[in-house]
Image (tube, grey):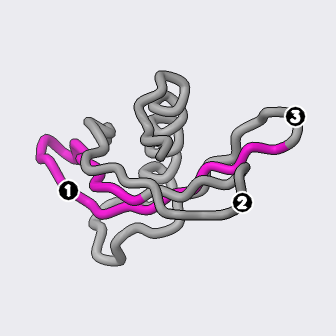
Amino acid sequence: MKVVEINSVAKEEGYIYYLNRYTGTAVLDILSSKVNLPVSFSIEINPLGMRNIEIDSLPADLNYPVMPVKKALKVFIDNMYKQGELPQV
């Protein structure tokens, strides 16, 4: 299982400056087939600058174990954040 990309990433409006919520469509490569999943996630930055990424929702009809999908998505989202690919507005 591999995360290929996350398309259509949009930032949700919020008033807490250290908590950002996003929605998008994750493209996963599962058993040699591409699967598109709607996903919503949040990134919280603590006072020391550490990022806490939480996957808020995944579809219930996913035919793959959830824990490896969440772990791979968190790593991919963290890399997107580090490279500045997430919307800021």
Which circle, 3 or 1, is nearer the viewer? 3
Q: Can you say which quadrant of the picture contains the N terminus?
A: top left
What residue sits 87% from the left and 34% below the top?
A: 48
Question: Which residue does the numbered mark 2 point to in the structure image?
Answer: 16
Between residue 29 and residue 15, name the one nearer to us.
15
Label 3: how many residues lie within 10 Å, few (<14), some (14-19) or many (20+)? few
Report the Cα–Cα distance between label 3 and label 2: 16 Å
Mark 2 → mark 1, Cα distance in angstroms = 30 Å
Q: Say which element carries label 3.
A: loop
How packed mark 2 is, by other alpha carbons closer than 10 Å (few <14, some 14-19, many 20 or more), is few
Front: mark 2 or 1: 2
Magenta stretch: give its range: 23-46
Task: Name the spot of residue 60 as percent of width and height, x first.
Answer: 35, 77
Residue occupying the far left of the picture = 33
Image position of 86 with respect to 11: above or below = above
Please give the name of the residue rendered at 48% of the width and 39% of the height, measured from the top-left corner: 77
Q: Earlier in the sequence, mark 2 or mark 1?
A: 2
Q: Place residue 78 in its image quadrant.
A: top right
Tag 3: amino acid: Leu
Which element is circle 2 on?
loop
Q: Please check the rendered image and state whether residue 41 is part of the magenta-colored stretch, yes or no.
A: yes
The amino acid type, in three-letter code, at marker 2 is Ile
Q: Secondary structure at mark 1?
A: strand
The residue tagged 3 is 48
| 13 in magenta | no
Give residue 36's mark: 1
Magenta stretch mostly in which secondary structure?
A: strand
Q: Nearer the viewer, residue 12 or 82?
A: 12
Tell whether label 1 touches label 2 (CB within 8 Å): no
- The mark nearer the N terminus, 3 or 2, is 2
Q: Is residue 4 above or below residue 34?
A: above
Q: Neighbour class for label 1 at 10 Å: few (<14), some, many (≥20)? A: few
